[in-house]
Amino acid sequence: MPSSAIQALFNMSTATIQQQIQQLNSDKSGLVLLNNQEMVRFTGPDTLTFLQGQLTCDVRQITDDCSKLGAHCTAKGRMIFTFRLIRSGDDLLMALEQSTADLVKSSLGKYAVFSKVTIEKDDSVVRIGANLVGAQQLAALLQLTLPQQLDQQTSSADASVCMVHGWSEQSAFYEFTLQQPSVELLNQLQLLDSQCWNYQQTRAGLPIISQPLSEAFTPHMVNLPAAGAVNFKKGCYTGQEVVARTHYLGKSKRRLCIGQVTLASKPELDQPISNTEGKDVATLVCATESEMVGSYLISFVGREDQTDLNISGSPIVLIDLPYSLEN
């Protein structure tokens, strides 16, 4: 999360969350302050080789031209946290859900003592999500060219922009990483609330893994291979044997699904998802505001073939994933 001094410079929208989500999904400029994310910086000569042996993505692919989603797992293949990995000069930056940032140092730090690598939070970095029109506006201010392919990135000395998952062929979304941005730049931007980006990520079928869900799922349970966050040719990493066995020899019985539900208030992570018989059959991963008051977009882990699900008696309307789950 940016420091409080930096956050004080932002010009935040005063519209309702529903109106802001509508703006992000429209042909108007939509720029979202990602202050629900924390940035962790990895420095040192062993950074690449160290992370290559710990993460599901191929760290060798992280360049000024490419950024990747990934996860860090336990030896049993359970995800501790998920992230996007970004090149920053000789360093690597990890953007991840704020509540899981402390897990980075505790889980990776025990391995880092054997390598020349330093792991520290970096609150000087600002992250901004954008729809196409907003990205065109901000890229022009930063003198960056917008990338045209998923995970492709364009970079300058102090900024980069990456194309990230949308929910249709017509939707294009981007994430900007700004290192110590100027006051003049920040004052030019009107920014939407980070809840809008939670909506965008959930609609794109990406899991938002918060601290209470750490070690609850394997990468396959939340569709990370389909999102390009697991490389099966990179070699060994912590948890690789379990993840590879699921991929090549079996099939995960549970998958990430998305849907819409109408409730009096936003559901909590511990609220059960039930079938018509009243049995708890799925685990809620994320619930976000949507374009209408009282309607919530949710992601949950359950069986692919389950239908007629509900939360507290309110039916869940399932939404097709924007990608294929085929290997």
Image (cartoon, helix red, strand yellow):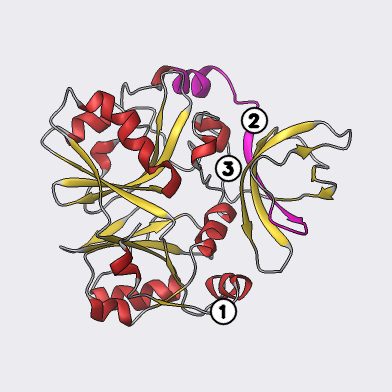
Q: Which residues are magenta?
A: 242-266
Res 200 seen here: yes
The residue labelled by disc 1 is 15
> Looking at the picture, how far across and down is residue 16, in whole percent?
60, 75
**Image quadrant assignment for residue 120:** top left
Magenta stretch containing residue 251, yes or no?
yes
The residue labelled by disc 2 is 254
Which-is-in-front pick, marks 2 and 1?
1
Outermost residue, right side: 277
Badge 3, how many Cα within 10 Å: few under 14, some, many 20+? few
Answer above or below: position of 47 versus 173.
above
**Image quadrant assignment for residue 138:** bottom left
The residue labelled by disc 3 is 324
- 82 or 305: which is nearer to us? 82
Amino acid at circle 2: Arg
- 146 or 16: which is nearer to us? 16
Give the CA separation, mark 3 to mark 2.
15 Å
Amino acid at circle 3: Ser
> Looking at the picture, how far across and down is residue 83, in whole percent?
39, 44
Residue drawn at (41%, 19%), measured in percent from left and top?
A: 75
**Image quadrant assignment for residue 185:** bottom left
Badge 2, how many Cα within 10 Å: few under 14, some, many 20+? many
320 sits left or right of 139 in the view: right
Mark 2: which secondary structure? loop
